[in-house]
Image: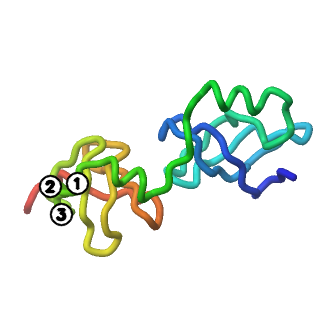
Amino acid sequence: MVRVGGDVDAMCSRCELILAHTVIAMVQGRPVKVQCNTCRTVHAFRGSPAGSHPRAAPRAAREKKSVLSFDEALAAKATAAARPYAPTTSYGHDEVVSHPTFGLGWVTLVRPDKVEIVFRSGSKTLIHARRKS
């Protein structure tokens, strides 16, 4: 049974994968707003809780997407080219970064002064491209 605060698998609009999400809001027993447990993006629910919709299985089969673990997603990246994290270094989207505390991760969002990086422990927003004083 799905409830607010519970977990549900849904298509994440940022990660573009079916991942575990936390239910934030429900209407008439159906999730309408969820938060991705990987990237922390809040968005409308895209999917159906298991068994709640008769077309749920065929739709999932048509999407042909599967849930990837952190290790599987990281294995698809160029981990040998991982650069060590430093606040003065600039990073690009999907670049693999090696952080001394959080380990390996990849950049999911780039802003002028900050990057969002997914690590095994979760998504972190870190500064980058900081000028040396």
- Which numbered mark, 2 or 3, is in the foreground of this view? 3
* Residue 50, quarter of picture: top right
Identify the image quadrant of the C terminus. Answer: bottom left
- Residue 35 placement (x, y as % from top left): 62, 48
- The local crowd at label 2, few if under 14, some if 14 to 19, many if 20 or more residues have their Cα within 10 Å, is few
Q: Give the vertical position of 54 relative to 72 (above or below).
A: above
Left or right of 50, for residue 119 = left
Instruction: Determine whether label 1 and label 2 are within 8 Å by CB.
Output: yes
Q: Give the vertical position of 81 relative to 65 (above or below).
A: below
- Residue 118 placement (x, y as % from top left): 40, 55
- Secondary element under disc 3, as helix, strand or loop, is strand
- Which residue is labeled 1 in the image? 128
Viewer-proximal residue, 65 or 120?
65
Name the residue rendered at 43%, 64% in the picture. 120
Name the residue rendered at 27%, 67% in the picture. 99
Between the C-alphas of marks 3 and 1, the distance is: 12 Å
Q: Give the vertical position of 86 relative to 25 (above or below).
A: below
- The local crowd at label 3, few if under 14, some if 14 to 19, many if 20 or more residues have their Cα within 10 Å, is few
- Which residue is labeled 2 in the image? 89
Name the residue rendered at 84%, 32% in the picture. 53
Left or right of 48, for residue 127 = left
Q: Please tell me which of labels 3 and 1 falls first in the chain.
A: 3
- Which residue is labeled 3 in the image? 84
- Label 1 sits on what residue type? His
